[in-house]
Amino acid sequence: MEIDIMRLAKLAKLSIPEEKVEEFRKKMEDIIQMVEKLPDLDTQGSLVDPTNTMELRKDEVQPSFPRDEMLQNAPYTAAGCILIPKVVD
Amino acid sequence: MNSNYEIVVGLEVHAELSTETKIFCGCKNEFGAEVNTNVCPVCMGLPGTLPVLNEQVVEYAIKMGHAMNCTINGTTKQDRKNYFYPDLPKSYQISQFDIPLCENGYLDVLVGDEVKRIGVTRIHIEEDAGKLIHDDSLGGSLADYNRCGVPLIEIVSEPDIRSADEAKAYLDTIHTTLLYLGISDAKMQEGSVRCDVNVSVRPVGSTEFGTRVEMKNVNSFSAAHRAINYEAARQIKVLENGGEIVQETRRWDDVKGVNVLLRSKEDAQDYRYFPDPDLLTFVVSDEKIAEIKASIPELPVAKTMRYMSEYKLSRADSELLALNKNTAAFFEAVIATGKCEPKSVSNWILGDIYKVLNERKCEITDLALTPVNLAEMISLIEKKTISNAAGKTVLEVILDADKDPNEIVKEKGLAQVSDTSALNAIVEKVLANNEKAVTDFKNGKTNVVGFLVGQCMKESKGKGNPAMLKDMVVAAIEKM
Amino acid sequence: MDKLYSLTAAQMKDLLDRKEVTSVEITKSVIDRIEKTDGEIQAYTSYNFDQALQQAAAADEKRAKGETVSELAGIPVAVKDNMCTKNLRTTAGSKMLGNFVPPYNATVVEKLIADGAVIIGKTTMDEFAMGSSGENSAFQVARNPWDTTRVPGGSSSGSAATVAASQVPLALGSDTGGSIRQPACLTGIVGMKPTYGAVSRYGLIAYGSSLDQIGPMARTVDDAAMLFKAICGKDKMDATSKDYTYTPYGDSVKGMKLGLPKEYFGEGISAEVKERIYQAVEVLKAQGAEIVEVSLPSTDYALSAYYIIACAEASSNLGRYDGVKYGFTGSDRSSLENLYVSSRSEGFGEEVQRRILLGTYVLSSGFYDAYYKKAKVLQKVIAKEFDDALKLCDAIITPLNPTTAFKIGEKSNDPVAMWAGDICTVTLNIAGLPGINVPCGFDSNNMPIGFQVLGRKFSESTLLTIAKCYENTVGGFAVKEF
């Protein structure tokens, strides 16, 4: 099985140094080989599980957190916001 | 537009729900707060935090599902849609993938006088992202996470829309439906309703769809109308020049009235959807689903149709009345008094009262006017107790004061004079003073009777009964 | 009093209740012990000594006033560094969160504080709980007190090491594929992974959300139970948590049926480990347990299912570490894309990157059905097999780790060999069941061996009963003089 490491890295926002690509590919392939040990199973249908359900929350307001606490770990801030490199959408 | 082609449009509408709190945490769901003040570790996606689903979001979405005639999936789940963007602090959006809360519905909309049925593929719940503010002076962009976790429904239509007008009618109907259900503020200018537009074209008569192009950044319904016509024309031009349409995403620029390539199909994202392990399957009981269904009011299109058939109103008037929930309720309350004709009520609401609402930029419910007073006023006109002109005088008072029109008529002496002897004196006086008109009438110019009746009304200071006066004028001349 | 630090939590509680010592005295003894030994053990990434002494003083004050206090009041507890502690650095063993100071407490931490426990510090761990040796920590490798050239297991490496080295009586660990039980086994202590949903995950920095569970680590069964009792129960902040009422346990296995699954005693398990476990089974049999053979045929596939599910969830959970909002930020801010890539490539260690890539792969378009979905279907099959087997018995006994602790560096460059070691533990996480490590002797290198007792959902009291019976019968577990 040939794994497109570069495509995966791009999706995951990782960069693998040129000299490590082969090593990564080899290790990944070993892992995939191990992980491929799955029996034939019917994978039709949804993964919804009515035997294990959750309760929903009431629509009641809880206090928000102070802004300075929420931004205390941000590397760069300005004007009460987190500062990021310029983006255009 | 080149008439050899048919336009095919599908729409994805995102509407923010007007719950008290966000979808997965207790932070306030509120527009316009100071940046990053409606945030907590959960909606900012801090390490270790977990989402807990707000039941009101589920109920609101089911309401919309019922309004759009959908099947409700009472047993469903939430899925993660993974992509990196700075307005999405967890790097995934919690949405729904293979089991939307509502699916396989339709919405009837009025296009001209025709009813058009647009298929609704699905409605699912998901969380909104934050806002990025672009600031050149800082050499970057600013991220405000207040909007993160605001609940959204995404309504996906079938590719059943065949023109920009149909798209506009569909969007307008969704808009009024959201307001009718009271589940969204649906304020376009605040971005609480947004849409993505899928457009393709095909030769008339073809049964296969053309390649579709998705347009983003369509920020108003009128922009959707412009964007569809632009994109259809662009595609037709490409095809006419022997080109091919490429599946891609384009960005609409409403100021310039053009769209530009955002990304091609090759750059298509791989969202790696999978069930959110932090949120288990949830079940809405059949009883609850039925209960929500029972709470759905009559919706604008149904109202419009009913006003047309039951009250014999025109399509345009019916729609105008039905479009606004408050106006429609007021109209129906006036009719319910049984005192007056629906047509007159419609005329008064859409005429004099609408003028006032527009001037004051307010809703009918903001006036002191009550349905009972309006009904009484109109019935006084219909009973010929007062003239139409006197009705306007009464309306001026009851718009801003809850006062019995009968009293106003008494106080202001507005009652019509129907006493024959009093009217006879007026008629005689007017005929005597207008010999030329009398002669004209005798010579066959019978339309001068209107002029003569007008003179009589003037003489009676507006209180004469115009119908009686007309009969009396004609009789008097014929006796001469 | 001498060596207060070496007491069990139950002993500390008795002395505190009898007002023979104060919590401040205990806490000072524990701090002194850590300061003297942690240079070698390397169990902590952050100390919380100042606050710990304040918490101790507060607990003493409550006791002095005669107020009713919780069992844990005044008793030092170490917390794995992937549980958020307000205003105390929480790194999850990663450079990515090297400077992260949470503005909130994990629910388990809230509960401990409400009980008056003394939070002594944050323990060393494999980065984002990905690892079975402790060697994947971005900061330091915790040592096995029984032989400091060997690993303590992982990923709750520091929690196991600090308890085993008698620095502190209690520690919280987290277990996604064995991360409480395996280091407990390798360091000769008790470690329990509760039923999925028994303990709130709110504030636990996620690895594989559908598998992660917080649990207690201690040198005795009673201590482990005391800590478990304090943290279990439904939390409105965690939609996957369940109503759970702690039930007391006993110490007799008389009449109990214990299952032995043949699939867990195959070639991969070392002869010494097997031998010790069979001896332990004999001990329980002698105490009146009936031994039955059970079968769990899909065991071989569990490892694949585990790595697919855990890595898929991790690839999504770890997307949030992007250099924008908190934690490590990359060197290249020339564009958003470059900020993302540099932050993640520089901030994550190699093992974490490998698991993110695997998770990305199994969820990606075209592979989802073949890997992720199939693993989720297999999860149901495995859970069903456990259900069926546990209809034939009250609990199941298996080896916990195929071998005893290996030398630092011995396997660290071979992910497959490392991953294969998880074979006995991951099945429980896949099935959502509780399991406990019970120490049962030593190998020829004098390294600890343990066996696993696992049971039905929410049957923690049964597991504790079996463990307690064994502990009593063998006269307690050996403690390393360190």
Image (cartoon, rainbow, N blue to C red):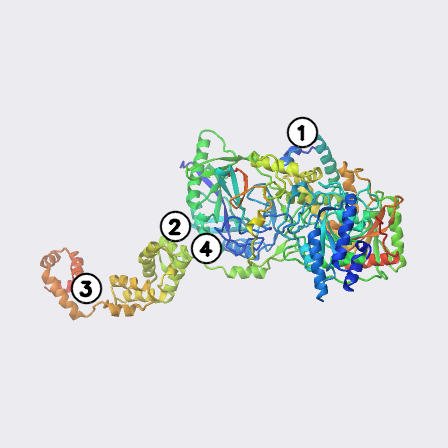
Give C52 or B7, whichever is nearer the viewer.
C52
Label 2 or label 4, whichever comes before in sequence order: 2
Give the numbered dot on residue B461. Answer: 3
Q: Do labels 2 and 1 share a chain?
A: no
| Distance from Cα at disc 3 to Cα at disc 1 | 98 Å
Give B391 or C204, whichever is nearer the viewer.
C204
The type of residue carrying mark 3 is Lys
The type of residue carrying mark 4 is Leu
Crowding near pointer 3: few (<14 within 10 Å), some, many (20+)?
few
Q: Mark 1 points at which residue?
A: A18
Crowding near pointer 4: few (<14 within 10 Å), some, many (20+)?
some
| Residue C349 seen anywhere in this rendered image of the structure | yes
| Distance from Cα at disc 3 to Cα at disc 4 | 46 Å
Q: Position of residue C180 (x, y in %)?
A: 76, 49
Q: Mark 2: which secondary structure?
A: loop
Crowding near pointer 1: few (<14 within 10 Å), some, many (20+)?
few
Q: Where is residue B351 in the image (x, y as percent from the top left)?
A: 31, 56
Q: Mark 4: which secondary structure?
A: helix
Q: In the rendered structure, are the residues bearing label 3 and label 4 in contact, judged by CB atoms less than 8 Å apart?
A: no
> Which residue corresponds to the image point at 84% horizontal and 56% vertical from the top-left?
C258
Q: Name the residue under label 4.
A: B179
| Distance from Cα at disc 2 to Cα at disc 4 | 23 Å
Q: Do labels 2 and 3 share a chain?
A: yes
Q: Are marks 3 and 1 on the same chain?
A: no
Q: Nearer the viewer, mark 2 or mark 1?
A: 1
Displayed quadrant of residue B479: bottom left
- What is the tally of numbered marks visible in this picture? 4
Q: Name the residue under label 2.
A: B113
Q: Which of marks 2 and 4 is in front?
A: 4
Q: In the rendered structure, are the residues bearing label 3 and label 1 in contact, judged by CB atoms less than 8 Å apart?
A: no
Q: Where is residue B419 in the image (x, y as percent from the top left)?
A: 19, 70
